[in-house]
């Protein structure tokens, strides 16, 4: 393999009450008769079997995403067709799992909009727009997405991208209460779905790439008053916060952090941006904690400690938030190896003599599949589910046996998994009849190197890693084609008892979507390239496929109304991969359409084709600048622009491709956007506090050089 290939693989990868008919399930028939509109409580969720309704993000409190509905099964799935579609009118990523309560579907889209739809027909009932200042988009590491709502006691709860937690009237969409849950002067965001347990709304936040301190909070569902908060990183002085997490840091957390480093000023990271699970049996909340800030521990905490509770699974008392146990998947996280991915609870025969134990399972970014005792957090097993070169395995306590070179320095280390992880936010599922976990896995490498220019930035990412290392200033068009061929997505049926894959399906370069398991013997999964597929849950054989005509990364759900089973998914092009690695797709992939697409047996509907104008793929000015200027521009582009506008200046289509932008061809217009903030209302804020005018102009020189390099191939960099 050529040297440019080896480095670039990694360097660039980067309302109506609808009568719910008798729902036929695998083991029983039930009739839901709610007392009031959206009368959901803890008991209703705990006794649900993810059958006629989909009451919470993971289907049930155990978050197995397994439905007991059987009408759509191996024999009938071939007759699945479109029942209805609904336009979300968004040009950004969509990650929402549809929630279905009393015949009403609740979904979210980009910028935290909430929609209530008739779940049988798709008719719009109401739409709520939280009126987010688009300038907050610069704080969103991975697109301005939202993964869904929670419904409880007649209210719909949504976490807003700007840090608000809001309660809406489930019938009308009117705001009941609104609380700001973060310091909005800092780069916090909320993209995850809330959970509600015993009258408490649980919500975390994101922003560790930019520099914040993470926590999980519980709010009273009726009043919005804060009940408790658990910080995941100590405060800089290692003194009490007056919160329930104080005791945990005094006992075990503070000693794992030094007294110096960027964590003292930047917060340390550890955001709880996705997985939050209620363990009813042990009356506890189990949640996943994210990466460190900055990523590079050498800058974050030179003392070299484990840095609790970064990259950890943590359990706290559901009522008080008091610490119970933790398990750290990646001590001293150095690579953005979050442990925020799906946590699933189940009873498995993994004890001595094969007796069943209640376990918590997770396949986090670092590439190991973990099985823990849910009550105590005891490590039971952990095995690699993808190829990796950062660790040789796990010791008897579940601690990674690291490969020394993975603690990267000045020399780039090409690593698997990269920061997008072996499994990202896409929900995995579990079939309790087959005892199989279905993992949306992936192989996306990254070259890590210490950033010699690192200092905390007021705008943009603060990783301490140099992602321009090893990447030549100008890359030929065939580079993007080569990169496309190196990325792999997979659906893995993992046996947590045998500790191995039962079967695996490779998706080529198509990034994964979330997974739905059903008692009909099916596993549904979408992909960001638009495929929606049903597989045989036992064998992995493809049984059905439908083209969504947009990205299908969200977690699907299923429900029953008037004796008909529906399967539904939200679609849209974007999210972390769509922004930072979307160059891997053909430019024919729809990039600016979002919908709810719902299927049923015998459905004859159609999904409308996207209608977008052709982009004029010609440079809007001559190239300028010498090699030194262009090389400098490539570094500043990698540090400030890649995450949104794409590596190698090749956009995914979510945001403008700067190579073909008229703004790139005009020095004053370029300065007006990047320095003066003329497009701040669109989310493109000023970089005046971070980039000098000369640096800004060097970026423009680099972008135009990339444009001219692509023109001879006539493919816009493809």
Image (cartoon, grey):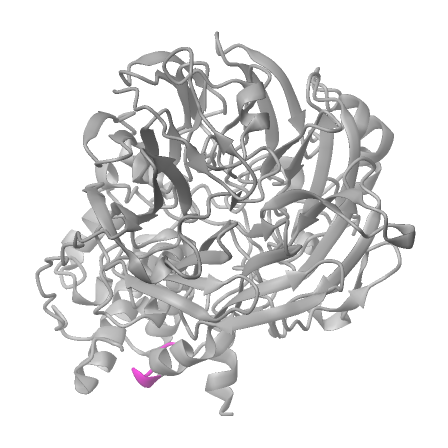
Q: Give the residue furthest to the right.
A: 352
Q: Is residue 646 above or below residue 90?
A: below
Is 636 placed left or right of 44 in the picture?
left
Q: Is residue 479 above or below residue 355?
A: below
Q: Is residue 407 visible?
A: no
Query: Is 361 a magenta residue?
Result: no
Image coordinates of residue 159 in percent, x first then y, are: 43, 28
| Viewer-side residue, 317 vs 474 | 317
Q: Is residue 633 visible?
A: yes
Q: Residue at (30%, 16%) from the top-left corner?
A: 171
Image coordinates of residue 106 in percent, x first then y, are: 34, 31
Q: Residue at (9%, 68%) from the top-left corner?
A: 616
Q: Give the residue furthest to the bottom.
A: 1
| Viewer-side residue, 85 vs 293 | 85
Query: Is 474 a magenta residue?
Result: yes
Looking at the rendering, the stretch of residues picked out in magenta corresponds to: 473-478
Q: How many marks can you see? A: 0
Principal secondary structure, stretch drawn in magenta:
loop
Image coordinates of residue 172 in percent, x first then y, are: 26, 16
Q: Is residue 218 above or below residue 97?
A: above
Q: Quadrant of the C terminus?
A: bottom left
Is 12 placed left or right of 388 in the picture?
left
Is 639 placed left or right of 275 in the picture?
left
Q: Residue at (33%, 65%) from the top-left corner?
A: 545
Image coordinates of residue 660 in percent, x first then y, are: 17, 66
Q: Residue at (37%, 75%) from the top-left corner?
A: 628
């Amino acid at each position: 393999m050529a040297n440019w290939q080896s480095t670039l693989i990694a360097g660039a990868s980067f309302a109506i009450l609808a009568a719910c008919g008798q729902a036929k399930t695998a083991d029983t028939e039930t009739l839901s008769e709610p007392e009031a509109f959206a009368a959901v409580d803890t008991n209703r969720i705990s006794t649900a079997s993810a059958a006629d309704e989909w009451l919470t993000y993971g289907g049930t409190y155990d978050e197995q995403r397994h439905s007991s509905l059987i009408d759509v099964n191996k024999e009938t799935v071939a007759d699945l067709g479109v029942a209805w579609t609904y336009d979300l009118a968004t040009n950004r990523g969509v990650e929402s799992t549809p929630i279905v309560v009393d015949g009403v579907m609740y979904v979210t889209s980009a910028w935290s909009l909430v929609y209530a739809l008739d779940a049988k027909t798709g008719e719009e009932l109401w739409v709520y727009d939280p009126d987010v200042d688009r300038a907050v988009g610069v704080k969103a590491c991975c697109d301005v997405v939202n993964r869904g709502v929670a419904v409880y006691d007649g209210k719909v709860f949504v976490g807003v991208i700007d840090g608000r937690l809001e309660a809406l009237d489930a019938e009308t969409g009117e705001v009941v209460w609104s609380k700001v849950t973060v310091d909005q002067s800092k780069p916090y965001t909320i993209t995850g779905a809330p959970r509600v347990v015993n009258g408490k709304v649980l919500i975390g936040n994101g922003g560790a790439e930019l520099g914040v301190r993470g926590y999980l909070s519980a709010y009273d569902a009726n009043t919005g008053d804060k009940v408790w908060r658990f910080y995941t990183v100590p405060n800089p002085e290692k003194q009490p916060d007056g919160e329930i997490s104080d005791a945990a840091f005094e006992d075990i957390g503070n000693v794992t952090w030094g007294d110096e480093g960027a964590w003292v000023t930047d917060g340390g990271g550890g955001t709880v941006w996705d997985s939050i699970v209620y363990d009813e049996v042990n009356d506890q909340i189990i949640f996943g904690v994210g990466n460190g800030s900055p990523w590079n521990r050498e800058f974050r905490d030179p003392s070299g400690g484990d840095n609790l509770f970064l990259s950890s699974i943590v359990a706290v008392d559901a009522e008080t938030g008091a610490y119970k146990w933790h398990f750290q998947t990646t001590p001293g996280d150095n690579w953005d190896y979050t442990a925020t991915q799906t946590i699933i609870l189940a009873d498995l025969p993994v004890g001595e003599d094969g007796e069943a134990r209640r376990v918590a399972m997770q396949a986090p970014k670092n590439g190991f599949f973990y099985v823990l005792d849910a009550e105590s957090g005891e490590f039971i097993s952990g095995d690699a589910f993808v190829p990796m070169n950062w660790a040789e395995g796990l010791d008897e306590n579940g601690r990674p046996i690291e490969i020394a070179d993975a603690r990267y320095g000045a020399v780039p280390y090409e690593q698997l998994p990269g920061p997008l992880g072996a499994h990202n936010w896409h929900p995995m599922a579990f079939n309790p009849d087959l005892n199989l976990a279905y993992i949306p896995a992936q192989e996306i490498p990254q070259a890590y190197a210490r950033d010699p220019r690192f200092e905390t930035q007021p705008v943009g990412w603060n990783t301490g890693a140099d992602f321009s290392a090893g990447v030549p200033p100008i890359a030929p068009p065939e580079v993007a084609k080569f990169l496309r061929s190196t990325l792999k997505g997979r659906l893995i049926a993992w046996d947590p008892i045998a500790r191995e894959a039962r079967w695996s399906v490779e998706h080529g370069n198509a990034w994964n979507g979330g997974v739905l398991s059903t008692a009909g013997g099916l596993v549904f999964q979408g992909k960001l390239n638009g495929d929606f597929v049903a597989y045989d849950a036992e064998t992995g054989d493809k049984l059905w496929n439908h083209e969504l005509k947009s990205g299908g990364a969200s977690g699907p759900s299923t429900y029953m109304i008037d004796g008909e089973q529906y399967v539904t998914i939200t679609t849209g092009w974007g999210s972390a991969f769509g922004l930072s690695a979307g160059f891997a797709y053909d430019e024919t992939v729809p990039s600016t359409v979002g919908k709810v697409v719902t299927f049923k047996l015998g459905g004859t509907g159609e999904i409308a084709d996207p209608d977008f104008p052709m982009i004029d793929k010609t440079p809007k000015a001559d190239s300028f600048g010498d090699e030194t200027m262009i090389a400098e521009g490539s570094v500043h582009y990698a540090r400030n622009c890649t995450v949104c506008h794409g590596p190698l200046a090749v956009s995914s289509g979510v945001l403008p491709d700067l190579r073909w932008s008229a703004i790139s061809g005009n020095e004053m217009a370029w300065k007006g956007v990047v320095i003066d903030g003329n497009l701040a209302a669109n989310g493109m804020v000023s970089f005046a506090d971070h980039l000098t005018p000369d640096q800004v102009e060097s970026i423009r020189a680099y972008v135009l050089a990339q444009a001219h390099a692509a023109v001879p191939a006539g493919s816009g960099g493809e």
